Each structure stands twice: as structure tokens, then as C-alpha cells.
Image (cartoon, rainbow, N blue to C red):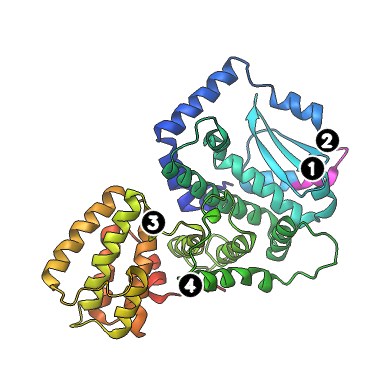
């Protein structure tokens, strides 16, 4: 067995991008040098001093759960589990040391979570190890004396959220129980135990829909704290796992991987920064591209409707649309700005702009064939898959 097929595509892509970043490589090298020189205390020594190692005899249930997850995910390294005293629900996978892998649980989590919920948590933590998430020194970089530049920080946070999606999928594969997975995420989010609150998974996941409604209120900018979160919101994680459960990776006859990744990315866009308000060069490139692309699509069928004009001005302000449009000049400008996007704008952000182009195109309640053809051309040039383009065209962000 291997866990690799379950890995979120953008986790892998951002991971590879970050590993090639000079700042990340430099921090990694510094940490490796400190480890070689013995300046970092032994992880196992710290765990033995501050936690209780759970042997098979002490916790046969947890040992059995670990065995099941190891087999399902193809883990090939000895595992030690530990418990530490804490009132908070938490678990962590610690970077391997001397050929051993360590997973630690808070005492309250072990007491409150049932078997299937623990399988999800165990699989999630093993997923972090299997996908190499320890290779990105996100903690030392973000907490260091010299913080990374904002653009790199945003990439680190975005990667971390997609890494959590990958680990969640590994956990779901181990749990094989969608209700238990949702319960585990609910408990982790709320801190509740017992039966004081009756969990309704649909209502918990519906918080994502409410977030989308709030984001649609253009007068209210998206909360920047979202961009600097290392974890997706728990209701969003439930939604993303619901999408995964309907894919071919989880069920026979499910939809393909492109559709899985495009739908997941549409959900995760809720936590991406709004480029319309950004001051950096990438945000400026995205705005300029949106301006020319939206005008090109809206005018290609012979004229811009009042609804399309109103939608355009929602993005760019009152009277922002030119009175006259030169279709030939617009098309030439569009191709130039696509080239600029390809040079500097990461793939997830290109999808954001395509989504907004489609919002303007759909404003008059239909997209005719010339508009669709031009949007398809834009998507192809940007390297955006057809399933993801269809999600943007339909505006269907409700995935249940």
C-alpha cells in the first residue's frame, strides 16, 4: 500500500516550489547543521522526560489502531506513541530521529475520542510523515528572528493548509468512517466532549456556505487572518473530505482526480488573499489581467450587457468600464497580459482570476458560445484543467 495517491495536488506542487526557494533551503541547511553538531536536544530524550510512552501492553487499542494505519498507508519505519498531560485536544507527528517515528497525543484527546476517531487522528499524523511535511521548516521560518518576506510567508501558510488536506485524506483512508471523521474534526474545533451538543454534520459543514455568503458582500474585505492560518477551517475540512469521499480514490465509480482537485481548490480559495486589495506586483498583474480578460469576454458577443457592466464595476469601481471597446486591441492586450500572468502568478492565484472572469461573464445569467470559447482559451493558456474551468463557469461552489 502507498499513501501517495491520496496526496493533495497543490500540497505537492507548493511543497516542491518551497523546497527550491533559497530562503527555505538556507533554513533547512542551518537546522541540519545544528542537528549534526548536537546543538538540538534529542527528541526521544525530551519525549521520555516529559511524556508517557504508550507500549503495546499499556494501550493495546492504540497499538492495534497504529498497526491498521501503518498497513493501510504503507509506513515502513518503527513507530513510538506518547501521551502528555493537557486539557486540550491535540496530536502531533514529530520528525523521525535515529530511524524512529514519534506520534504524540494529549491525554484529553485519548480519553475523549473513540476508536474510529482515533484512527482518523493517527492516519492524519502519519500522513504528515509520509508526505514529507517535516521537510519544510515552516515553524523556524515563521518564528525566527528574521521573518520571511510577505510573499514567501503567504506561500508557506497556503502550503501548510493544503498539507493538512493531504493529511486529512490519509486519516480518512484509515478511519473508513465519514461520520467519525466529521466527529473528530468537530471535537478538535469545538473542544467539546460527551453528548452535551448533538453534532449535525450538515449544519457544521454549512458554516462554509455562510462564509461564502459573507465573502460575497463586496463591501467587506476578507479577513486577512485567514491568509495567515496554517490550518483550514474545520467546517471547510469536513467539506473537502466530503468531496474526497465521492472521488475514485475513495469509492468505485467516483469522479476523477482532476475533478477532486478542482473542487478542493475552489473550497480552499475561501482562505486565499483578495488580490483586488493587494499592493504587491503579483496582485497588480492579476488585476490588470482581470481588467482586460473581463472586457474581452463581455464584449466578444457584440456588446456588454448592463448586468455585465454592473458586475465589472463591482470589481473596479463606478464608471471604470471604458465607453468604447476595440475588440482587436483588447484581444492583443489579453494575450500580453496572459504572458505576464504566466511569468509571475502561481497556479492557485490564476484560478482565482478565472473564477472572477466567469463571475462577470455570468452576470446576465448566461454564457454564450463565443464567451465560453474565449474562457476556454484563457484557461488553456493559463494551464487550468477543463474540470476546474467548468467549476468556475458554473459557479457551483456547493459540493454536497
Q: Nearer the viewer, residue 276 or 241?
A: 276
- Residue 203: in magenta span: no
Mark 4 — residue? 216
Q: Earlier in the sequence, mark 2 or mark 1?
A: 2
258 or 198: which is nearer to us? 198
Q: CB atoms at circles 2 and 1 under 8 Å apart?
A: yes
Mark 3–mark 4 Cα distance, whole angstroms, equals: 18 Å
Q: Which residues are magenta?
A: 54-65
Camera-side residue of 237 and 280: 280
In this figure, which residue is indicated by the disc labeled 2? Answer: 55
Q: Is residue 352 left or right of residue 227?
A: left
Q: Is residue 366 visible?
A: no
Pointer 3: what residue?
A: 349
Residue drawn at point x = 85 percent, y = 43 percent: 60
Q: Decide: marks 2, 3 in contact (CB < 8 A)?
A: no
Which residue is found at the position 19% from the left and 60% from the top?
Answer: 335
Circle nearer the N terminus (2, 3): 2
Residue 334 position within the rendered picture, expressed as x and y whole percent measured from the top left: 20, 63
SS under mark 2? loop
- Gap between marks 2 and 4, in whole Å? 51 Å
Name the image quarter holding residue 78: top right
In percent of width and height, residue 62 lies at: 80, 45
Q: Position of residue 365 (x, y in %)?
A: 36, 85
Left or right of 307: which side holds 26? Answer: right
Measure the C-alpha gap from mark 3 to mark 1: 43 Å
Q: Residue 63: which disc?
A: 1
Amino acid at each position: 500500500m502507498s499513501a501517495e495517491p491520496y496526496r493533495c495536488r497543490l500540497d505537492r506542487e507548493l511543497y516542491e516550489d518551497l523546497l527550491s526557494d533559497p530562503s527555505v533551503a538556507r533554513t533547512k541547511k542551518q537546522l541540519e547543521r545544528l542537528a549534526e553538531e548536537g546543538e538540538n536536544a534529542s527528541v526521544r530524550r525530551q519525549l521520555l522526560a516529559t511524556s508517557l510512552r504508550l507500549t503495546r501492553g499499556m494501550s493495546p487499542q492504540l497499538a492495534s489502531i497504529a498497526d491498521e494505519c501503518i498497513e493501510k498507508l504503507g509506513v515502513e519505519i518503527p513507530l513510538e506513541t506518547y501521551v502528555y498531560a493537557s486539557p486540550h485536544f491535540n496530536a502531533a507527528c514529530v520528525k523521525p530521529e535515529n530511524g524512529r517515528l514519534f506520534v504524540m497525543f494529549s491525554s484529553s484527546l485519548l480519553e475523549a475520542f473513540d476508536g474510529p476517531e482515533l484512527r482518523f487522528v493517527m492516519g492524519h499524523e502519519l500522513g504528515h510523515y509520509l508526505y514529507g511535511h517535516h521537510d519544510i521548516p515552516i515553524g523556524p521560518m515563521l518564528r525566527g528572528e528574521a521573518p520571511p518576506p510577505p510573499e514567501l510567508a503567504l506561500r508557506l501558510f497556503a502550503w501548510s493548509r493544503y498539507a493538512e488536506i493531504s493529511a486529512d485524506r490519509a486519516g480518512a483512508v484509515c478511519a473508513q468512517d465519514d461520520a467519525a471523521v466529521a466527529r473528530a474534526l468537530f471535537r478538535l474545533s469545538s473542544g467539546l466532549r460527551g453528548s452535551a451538543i448533538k453534532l449535525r454534520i450538515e449544519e457544521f459543514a454549512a458554516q462554509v456556505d455562510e462564509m461564502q455568503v459573507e465573502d460575497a458582500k463586496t463591501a467587506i474585505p476578507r479577513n486577512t487572518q485567514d491568509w495567515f492560518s496554517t490550518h483550514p477551517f474545520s467546517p471547510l475540512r469536513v467539506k473537502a473530505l466530503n468531496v474526497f469521499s465521492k472521488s475514485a480514490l475513495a469509492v468505485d465509480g467516483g469522479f476523477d482526480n482532476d475533478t477532486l482537485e478542482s473542487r478542493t481548490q475552489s473550497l480552499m480559495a475561501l482562505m486565499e488573499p483578495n488580490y483586488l486589495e493587494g499592493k504587491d506586483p503579483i496582485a497588480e498583474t492579476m488585476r490588470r489581467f482581470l481588467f482586460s480578460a473581463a472586457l474581452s469576454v463581455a464584449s466578444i458577443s457584440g456588446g456588454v450587457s448592463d448586468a455585465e457592466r454592473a458586475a465589472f464595476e463591482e470589481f473596479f469601481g463606478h464608471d471604470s468600464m471604458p465607453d468604447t471597446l476595440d475588440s482587436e486591441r483588447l484581444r492583443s492586450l489579453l494575450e500580453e497580459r496572459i504572458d505576464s500572468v504566466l511569468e509571475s502568478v502561481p497556479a492557485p492565484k490564476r484560478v482565482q482570476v478565472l473564477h472572477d472572469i466567469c463571475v462577470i461573464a455570468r452576470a446576465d445569467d448566461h454564457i454564450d458560445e463565443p464567451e465560453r470559447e474565449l474562457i476556454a482559451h484563457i484557461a488553456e493558456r493559463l494551464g487550468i484543467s477543463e474540470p476546474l474551468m467548468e467549476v468556475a463557469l458554473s459557479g457551483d461552489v456547493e459540493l454536497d
